[in-house]
Amino acid sequence: MTTEPISFLKDAAEVDQAAVQPLPSSRKIYVTGSRPDLRVPMREIRLSDSNTEQGPQPNAPLVVYDTSGPYTDPAASIDLRKGLSPVRDAWIHEREDTETLAGYTSEFTRRRLRDPALDILRFEDHRKPLRAKPGRNVSQMHYARQGIVTPEMEFVAIRENLKLQEARELGWLDGQHPGQSHGASIPLEITPEFVRDEVARGRAIIPANINHPELEPMIIGRNFLVKINGNIGNSAVSSSIEEEVEKLTWGIRWGSDTVMDLSTGKNIHETREWIIRNSPVPIGTVPIYQALEKVNGVAEDLTWDIFRDTLIEQAEQGVDYFTIHAGVRLHHVPLTANRVTGIVSRGGSIMAKWCLAHHTESFLYTHFEDICEIMKAYDVSFSLGDGLRPGCVADANDAAQFGELETLGELTQIAWEHDVQVMIEGPGHVPMHLVKENMDKQLECCEEAPFYTLGPLVTDIAPGYDHITSGIGAAMIGWYGCAMLCYVTPKEHLGLPNKDDVKTGIITYKIAAHAADLAKGHPGAQLRDDALSRARFEFRWEDQFNLGLDPDTARAYHDQTLPKDSAKVAHFCSMCGPKFCSMQITQEVREYAREHGMETQEALNRGMQEKSEQFTRAGARIYDKI
Amino acid sequence: MTTEPISFLKDAAEVDQAAVQPLPSSRKIYVTGSRPDLRVPMREIRLSDSNTEQGPQPNAPLVVYDTSGPYTDPAASIDLRKGLSPVRDAWIHEREDTETLAGYTSEFTRRRLRDPALDILRFEDHRKPLRAKPGRNVSQMHYARQGIVTPEMEFVAIRENLKLQEARELGWLDGQHPGQSHGASIPLEITPEFVRDEVARGRAIIPANINHPELEPMIIGRNFLVKINGNIGNSAVSSSIEEEVEKLTWGIRWGSDTVMDLSTGKNIHETREWIIRNSPVPIGTVPIYQALEKVNGVAEDLTWDIFRDTLIEQAEQGVDYFTIHAGVRLHHVPLTANRVTGIVSRGGSIMAKWCLAHHTESFLYTHFEDICEIMKAYDVSFSLGDGLRPGCVADANDAAQFGELETLGELTQIAWEHDVQVMIEGPGHVPMHLVKENMDKQLECCEEAPFYTLGPLVTDIAPGYDHITSGIGAAMIGWYGCAMLCYVTPKEHLGLPNKDDVKTGIITYKIAAHAADLAKGHPGAQLRDDALSRARFEFRWEDQFNLGLDPDTARAYHDQTLPKDSAKVAHFCSMCGPKFCSMQITQEVREYAREHGMETQEALNRGMQEKSEQFTRAGARIYDKI
């Protein structure tokens, strides 16, 4: 875990083999849109037949959302040193609103490129950076507001629909619980026009930097599937470039919709280049971390010029969204003085320290419009940071937190004036009964700009299990309307996550996001639950494993007690044993219902009515005594 | 895992050493009540000093609820072959309403005792069974309704208070969030009289069989701390007596408030004897499982006489609560025919099968009052089983489930007529937005009799992680008013839990129960969160570990990145590294606040007001442009 980054040799860079195997019984499929180069990836899970009295009946395969990119496509050739193929290139250039720069604009970038000591770890990049032509705005929001449906928007629409049209015609969606949307308005089918309108309205964002052509576009908004983010990144004490790229490919394999690179250690410019060039998902960063490195960790020494150069450096690498803590204002800072854990956001405390040292307003706040100019020249989305989020349940929903949130609402309006995409970051540590207030206040202050929360953790007493304390809050706030959930791993508060922790965090958050989709009544969300439950009921063990979020773990757990292959088709499990099984008995109930003419719902109700009367009379004997 | 029970040799029986070590920096304390033999165990966690400008300041130790019994008391001598000391003996005999029987009443028990083949695994029991004198009722509810405060009630009152009186006087509870109780009415201090009134009212139960004198009494009710249950038990394919006793001592070490023995395999009578004699927590069972064994798994062959003998067999061993599926009525059964997963409760499907085979009402229902007579002769509490609980989200809240719940409400009234204690079992698999309806309907149908739910699981798609899918639902329903949460382990649906799974399940459910207490605003619940957060903020790493639910795991995770002891006092962690830490910056914020006369809340507000005006003017420059 303490490999020095410099030990990394780019020529030896190899993809993690564990990340490029297709998932069991799954194949990558592509749905082609209105143009041949618009191919939307999905994962199809093949199921075995059901054994019925009429003999084996085939089960339709289930299509699920796929964030893993080309890595799980056996047809794709993967070479980390070359990076992924730039699927968006044509879409970007066709718009004819960008110019290819001769070189990188950032001073810092040019200095790094000149340094021969970095040759051995530098990604061999042959592309030239893009930037909007003078006076042009290349944000998806800008296009949307002009009524343009971009290929990115069409891609997203197809992706969100998951080929549901067919299932809908077959009536498979009818059985789903209606759900309680808390004001979300999710259409039965997502059209490209709906995507455009949501982006134009600011209620959803498509993070898609023009310098990240390798991206498979995705959308973040309360009227779409709830998304999750996984954090990676090395620190001064641990981890190398290799490990970070491995965490990326590992994280998206299990379902990370976006990945944030929170590196604070050495060579973070080069680490980021390797990550972006090999990432099919949006990459987010917190530029102030790197800016702080540039002033040797002395927050007071930060300047607008250094920060500005950092924004351009990262924008030209292709970062899709920036966390910017522009909502931390000088007059908020003293409000944290009496907190139990004060300021726990790194970005927030950096800016607080700067504000105090200079006793003036933060340059992120005073230069906010200058930042907007940079964002729209590359289509980098804002993730307005919650620098004053509570670090413990005691500090939840206090004046500092909500004071900042109101400022974030003001900044959202300014960003929207520039047609710049915005999402809002949220807490943190919040007890269950205070979670909804966070969601409601955010919707109100930020006019439904997508909310992106860290958990929240609903208690502080379980270090080592904060994926669970936060998964509870995440599921709830997702239901209430949160658009993206930032994962928390078991190592939170204790150390840097390793690959296992990343997977555990991702799976936990896929559970939270899906539970939220179910509770919101997202069309088709219940199909996977029903398919898995049917497999469970019919003892199709392999299907039960393969339909789960983590087939490998499910199979391994089953095999701990019943390793034999025969057990995979057995009509029992180790919980009840072969002699007795409740599932089997239910089959007899069905026969009984048939025999007594109760196979239809009406018949059932009629039958129940009769029996009810009959047995209330019988039962009456009992109640007479009372 | 497939040890044959017969391999167990009672003379070799030894306590699991991992279960008898005191937890780190913790000591067992006893609070003595109104009589010397009423000693209520608690765990005191000692904390290190805080380093302040005024030098080291001591931190008061934190007292936490302790379910681990004598096992974590170095002063106690533990011998599994002798069992725990009968702390309740005197309390029971003083009431002079019981008689000591010459031998066991149950035919089956006597047969087992005569069988020499069982000598090597039989617990050497020298006690004689107790039963209420003819015409007497020995239930805690019966005493409560006569206005009697039993030692059990006083024990529970002291236990629930956790020595909070002192903390309250010091004002430590004032900082806690008020909470949202959803109709629960929890007093600031639990008095023995309040316990009595809640038990008399049927809103809480104290499971305490007169044949389980080793029990440390606890209470289950919506106006008390939310409790959790851990299931153990062998099956036909796996596990031995030794393993089950190990799971018991392991489970209560981590916080299991009650333990259910769900054994369905061989020698379950002897297994149960070992478990009860060594258990300081209430033991629950599902008697129909053993009854089914007695008729070789043929449900149709079950009779009232066999079941009755099984109830008496287990009641005279000391089982504290019985799960009885008396709510499964013939006319409910056809309602499950169109379900996705039919009937998934083992007890429910056994009774459904019996009802169908005989096409008549269940003997559990028709003999319900006969069962009450047995319950009150030993003070066994009802846990009215939800035999028709949904086995997948698709089947949640349907006619079968709620039809049974209404019947359970009728049966509750009958049990209360007999002064028999009752709790009600609940689902199961329920999407988040349908969880509250379950709680509200149960409170209404069963007049606030304690609800005891299995999860619920909020999605079906994560086999291998169902401790998490269910932990989400458990936290929510606990907040809404559920009194006890039955744990689910990672092995759910896949296999029998081993010791690691038991621990993971328990910790996950302690998180859910505590999150619920916080959200309900349970007095003092936030003290542990605040103590841990303060330790975190002050870099008291050891305290942070020791105040957590699982100190061992927290320490191990921290040490994976920073193994050195020096790191345990370092003012940084591996997440940010030594150069930069947000917590440190917050210290400077406090100095700033002091310097600017903002140390009091009023000063803070005044200060904020001024700055606010000052910077709104400054900020105005930005908004002018728009």
Image: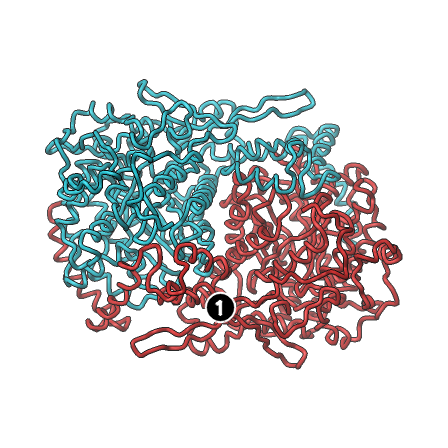
Chain colours: A red, B cyan
Q: Position of residue B490 (x, y in %)?
A: 44, 51
- In which quadrant is the C terminus of chain B drawn? bottom right
**Left or right: where B611 falls relative to B133:** right
The residue wearing badge 1 is A523
| Residue at the image position 25 percent from the left and 35 percent from the top | B123
Report in which chain the residue with disc 1 lies: A
A17 vs B37, nearest the viewer: A17
**B263 to A58, vertically: above or below:** above
Task: Name the residue furthest top.
Answer: B36
Res A211 quadrant in image: bottom right
Residue A191 visible (yes or no): yes
| Residue at the image position 68 percent from the left and 63 percent from the top | A279
Q: Position of residue A531 (x, y in %)?
A: 42, 68
Res A177 quadrant in image: bottom left
**B496 to A587, vertically: above or below:** above
A420 vs B534, nearest the viewer: B534
Q: How many marks?
A: 1
B12 vs B612, nearest the viewer: B12
**Left or right: where B89 falls relative to A147:** left
Q: Position of residue A197 (x, y in %)?
A: 63, 69
Res A126 quadrant in image: bottom right
Q: Position of residue A543 (x, y in %)?
A: 44, 67
Q: How dense is the environment of label 1, judged by Cα within 10 Å: few (below 14), some, or many (20 and up)? A: many
B416 vs B133, nearest the viewer: B133
Residue B184 visible (yes or no): no
**Left or right: where A622 falls relative to B90:** left
Q: Secondary structure at mark 1?
A: loop
Residue type beneath disc 1 = Pro
